[in-house]
Image (spheres, rainbow, N blue to C red):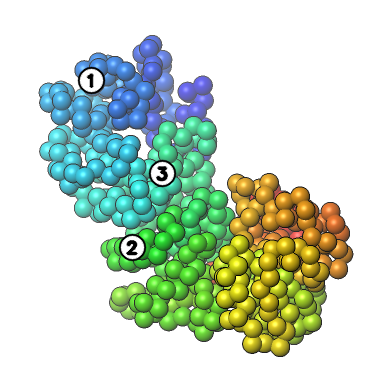
């Protein structure tokens, strides 16, 4: 099985494989694997104290790596700095395999990071390695800074969802390697990607020092399909960019700290961001506080979902904000109803949710004179939203959830995250959907899954439906073209989303 997995990893594009011998009892198995390698190999025997499974003492573990078949036939062996500090003579013996001297902290970033790097540099090794569990996205910058300033080849990355950025951008900053698993079930550390995702989704082989960085800022973020659609678009357009999921805690200070740090980091070249739940208002506040330009529409909506970052003539970054949800919502509805925007004024529309997407929907439909009922879990927010935009000919009213359920509308729009993956069994109405009919269009802005339970309920009652994918693709096309100045490969973007969600996408 190990030989099969080594071959599969090499076929998938891996340059090296790591052979973990933490629990291996018969060393002849290792000799067989290394005797006829199908791929270059690192051999590791990791103690439980640093995330492994070996219960051997330091000297017994070290003997497996610095002597015998591992030392003679492996390309590299990975030995912990802590082990060497306890037994200073372990590295006195010269071995053919290159030594990766490593530090792992499974709880948090080491407080003495600089001292540990100094300790690594003082010991004979081919490669330094520093890995820790990230608590915030800002810690990725600490890892990338280690790569920028390292005196010898280095591996530096953060574990966990917050550390995903360092696993991918290590290539841009000269990392000796990054780690990936053969499949999702075989990951050896939190946040580890598969080889297929690293190479195909995140374009590892195409990354370099000049690659521009983009991302989606959200909490949570691992469910997002934005990286798949934008990275595929970059590949199709021949554009040197990479788009990452960026986990940023929901409060404003976390958003500000993230953006300040990534904008200033040397060589990062952060060039654009998608902003989604719960940061659309945070993005608008940040842009206003920094004196950045915000389009009038986004200011009126009170939410930014797209940040554009330019560096004219290599100078300091200049930010601007816009809202691409607005047009995406309108175009999704008019395409389904086969009307132009002026025809929206004849509609009676229910909007559930008063967050960033809800505000965009209300602002867009109010502009064209639709009659709007808006409801939100916090009723005061619905009242404030209705009052803010209730200056158009159609009129806007804030209603309770029960009133919304009893109403009859031409269009119902769910702008909340209810029903979003992984909570796919949820629906705003649970088992008591409103009286949808063939005269109703039900629009769920949730795009993952493509077929939400709300849409299934609506279709069961004969209503016409609009998947959140339609809005998602439309706003993503606008973002891509704004960031790159290139026409978006729309067919590719739609195909990627349909493939990822496993459902054919029929575009009108």
Return the residue at label 2. Answer: 257
Tell me the residue at 73%/80% (across/down).
370
N-term-proximal mark, 3 vs 1 = 1
Q: Position of residue 327 (x, y in %)?
A: 63, 76
The picture quadrant where one finds residue 393 is bottom right
Return the residue at label 1. Answer: 58
Pointers 3 and 2 in contact (CB under 8 A)? no
Q: Position of residue 331 (x, y in %)?
A: 69, 74
From the viewer's side, name the closer residue of 371 and 16.
371
N-term-proximal mark, 1 vs 2 = 1
Q: Residues within 10 Å of mark 2 (few under 14, many from 20)?
A: few
Tell whether 222 sits left or right of 327.
left
Q: CA–CA distance between discs 3 and 2? A: 19 Å
Tell whether 64 sits left or right of 482.
left
Can residue 422 be seen from the camera position used here?
A: yes
Q: CA–CA distance between discs 3 and 1? A: 27 Å
Asked which secondary structure carries label 3, the reply is loop
Of marks 3 and 2, the one in the foreground: 2
Q: Position of residue 402 (x, y in %)?
A: 72, 62
| 152 over 307 or under it: above or below | above
Tell whether 209 sits left or right of 431.
left
Pointers 3 and 1 in contact (CB under 8 A)? no
Tell me the residue at 35%/30% (across/down).
51
The disc at residue 160 is: 3
């Amino acid at each position: 099985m190990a030989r099969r997995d080594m071959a599969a990893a090499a076929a998938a594009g891996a340059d090296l494989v790591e052979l973990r011998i933490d629990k291996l009892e018969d060393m002849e198995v290792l000799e067989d694997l290394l005797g006829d390698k199908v791929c270059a190999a690192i051999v590791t025997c990791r103690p439980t104290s640093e995330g492994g499974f070996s219960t051997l003492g330091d000297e017994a573990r070290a003997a497996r790596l610095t002597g015998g078949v591992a030392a003679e036939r492996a390309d590299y062996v990975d030995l912990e700095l802590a082990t060497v500090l306890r037994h200073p003579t372990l590295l006195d013996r010269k071995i053919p395999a290159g030594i990766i001297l490593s530090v792992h902290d499974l709880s948090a970033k080491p407080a003495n990071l600089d001292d540990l790097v100094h300790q690594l540099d003082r010991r004979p090794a081919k490669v330094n390695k520093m890995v820790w569990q990230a608590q915030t996205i800002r810690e990725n910058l600490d890892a990338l800074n280690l790569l920028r300033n390292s005196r010898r080849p280095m591996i530096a990355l953060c574990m966990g969802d917050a550390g995903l950025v360092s696993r991918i951008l290590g290539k841009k900053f000269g990392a000796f390697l990054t780690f990936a698993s053969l499949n999702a079930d075989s990951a050896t550390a939190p946040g580890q990607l598969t080889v297929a995702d690293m190479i195909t989704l995140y374009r590892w082989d195409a990354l370099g020092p000049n690659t521009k960085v983009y991302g989606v800022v959200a909490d949570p973020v691992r469910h997002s399909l934005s990286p798949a659609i934008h990275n595929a678009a970059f590949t199709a357009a021949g554009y040197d960019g990479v788009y990452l999921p960026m986990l940023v805690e929901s409060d404003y200070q976390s958003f500000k700290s993230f953006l300040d740090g990534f904008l200033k980091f040397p060589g990062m070249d952060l060039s654009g961001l998608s902003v989604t739940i719960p940061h659309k208002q945070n993005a608008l506040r940040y842009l206003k506080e920094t004196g950045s330009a915000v389009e009038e529409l986004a200011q009126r909506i009170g939410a930014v979902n797209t940040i554009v970052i330019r560096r004219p003539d290599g100078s300091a970054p200049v930010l601007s904000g816009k809202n691409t949800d607005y047009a995406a919502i309108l175009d999704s509805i008019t395409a389904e109803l086969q009307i132009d925007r002026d025809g929206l004024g004849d509609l009676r529309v229910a909007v559930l949710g008063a967050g960033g997407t809800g505000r965009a929907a209300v602002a867009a439909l109010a502009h064209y004179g639709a009659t709007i009922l808006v409801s939100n879990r916090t009723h005061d927010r619905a009242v404030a939203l209705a009052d803010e935009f209730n200056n158009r000919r159609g009129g806007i009213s804030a209603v309770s959830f029960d009133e919304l359920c009893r109403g009859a509308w031409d269009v119902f729009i769910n702008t909340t995250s209810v029903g979003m993956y992984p909570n796919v069994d949820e629906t705003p109405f649970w088992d008591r959907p409103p009286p949808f009919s063939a005269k109703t269009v039900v629009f769920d802005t949730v795009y993952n899954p493509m077929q939400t339970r709300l849409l299934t309920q609506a279709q069961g009652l004969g209503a016409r439906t609009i998947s959140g994918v339609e809005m998602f693709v439309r706003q993503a096309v606008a973002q891509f073209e704004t960031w790159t100045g290139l026409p978006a490969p729309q067919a590719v973007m739609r195909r990627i989303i349909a493939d990822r969600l496993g459902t054919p996408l029929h575009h009108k």
